[in-house]
Amino acid sequence: MPDVILSEARTPAPALAARAARTGSSPVRDILALTARPEVISFAGGLPAPELFDAAGMADAFRHVLAEAPRRVLQYSTTEGDPALRAAVAARYSARGLPTEADDLLVTTGSQQGLSLLATALLEPGDVVLVEDPCYLAALQIFSLAGARVVPVPTDDGGLDPAALDEIAARERPKLLYVIPTFQNPTGRTLSAERRAAVAEVAARRGLWIAEDDPYGELRFEGEPAPWVAAFPGAEDRTALLGSFSKVMAPGLRLGTVRAPAALRRACAIAKQAADLHTSTIDQAAAARYLAVTDLDGHLARVRDAYRARRDALIDGLPAALPEGSRWNRPAGGMFVWATLPPGYDAAALLPEVVKHDVAYVPGAPFFAGAPDPTAARLSFVTHAPEEIREGLGRLRKALEGTRREG
Ligand SMILES: Cc1ncc(COP(=O)(O)O)c(C=O)c1O
């Protein structure tokens, strides 16, 4: 008799955690996979125009830090982040009316990580998070993974409705409001200064944290920026402001920042130690070098000019491309236009036919935490040049021609 009985029987490995099982892959990522064919003119992805990356400037910055300080930039570094990079970001906030010290900032691996860290630092399963309806999808994923109960706050063409926010905050006792006040994803909408002040006031009175996500604010084509929500009375001690290098430099850098009150920032730093110890030392050093020797505002002016022309090409072409009775906005910046087809249309159901015509958008429905609007679609205008946008809209017109409203 052997000491050990060898058997063919196998016991299955335990199930995934409930949070993993209940959180699906982003429908936008799935659509992007469908539209990856080079012949597709895609209005779906929120991809910055690659030809506008300052590749030469970034290459110089990486070469410089590797040549000058290889032992430092190839080494582990602090969780809080590169001091020069934090100082440069703090100076940009301060210059725009939000006094900020380098030590007020935590460098993150993209602002997406900032949002994850906030969820880890703030949310218990069952906690209520208020979001704009519709809302950035990957934020909904984070809140779902955290086990939070997401409650939608109604919006209109001016963004989040502060009166509805007040009412829902009184009823739901939320811990956190997540808001993208400028050129929101997916709608391109911007909150007025009055609404920002009202959001700050409600948050202070009802006792909630604010996560203010601002990856698009620097992409303003016209008009004057409103101050950050974080700058309004009531919000100072309760706002985590998320910044990103993705839309001003390059998303592949995976660099962002969290500006937050000390106790929350420290909790985020501990969560970050557990997540990835620190953001890439060399990437941070190269970004700091780049900011030190480059006129970022000059670079941004070129990006804004190009994006403004692309927005105009999209807006000018939409009347002919979309069925009569469709509506859309004209954002003053950012990357997205939000369109609604006439009642009875279903943007998700139409997409397979649209993709057959080598053009794509993202259906709006998945962005809603509340009742979805099946007629809505998000159109990104930044990835393609104006002539390709016009060609894409011609294909969209053909794809939608002959489609019937359902029901
Ligand atoms: C509203 C919003 N927040 C955060 C992110 C993530 O940006 P990052 O590349 O800085 O992680 C995005 C990216 O599209 C976004 O639209």
Image (cartoon, grey):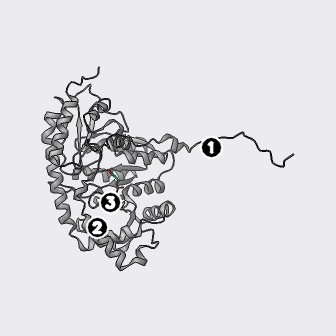
Residue assigned mark 1: 14
Residue 237 horizontal/vertical position (percent):
37, 61
Amino acid tagged 1: Pro
Residue assigned mark 3: 243
Residue assigned mark 2: 58
Residue 193 horizontal/vertical position (percent):
22, 53
As helix, strand or loop, the secondary structure at mark 3 comes to strand
Q: Label 3, label 1: how many angstroms apart (C-alpha)?
A: 39 Å
Q: Label 2, label 3: how many angstroms apart (C-alpha)?
A: 19 Å
Residue 82 drawn above or below residue 173: below
Extreme right residue here? 1
**Which part of the image, by quadrant, shows the N terminus?**
top right
Q: Label 2, label 1: how many angstroms apart (C-alpha)?
A: 46 Å
How packed is label 1: few (under 14 Cα within 10 Å), some, or many (20 or more)?
Answer: few
Question: Toward which corner of the image does residue 165 lie, by quadrant?
Answer: top left
Q: Residue at x 35, y 38 (%)?
A: 368
- Which of label 2 and label 1 is nearer to you? 2
Asked if residue 203 shows in the view, the reply is: yes
Q: Residue at x 13, y 34 (%)?
A: 320
Instruction: Choose between 208 and 329: the one closer to the eye.
Output: 329
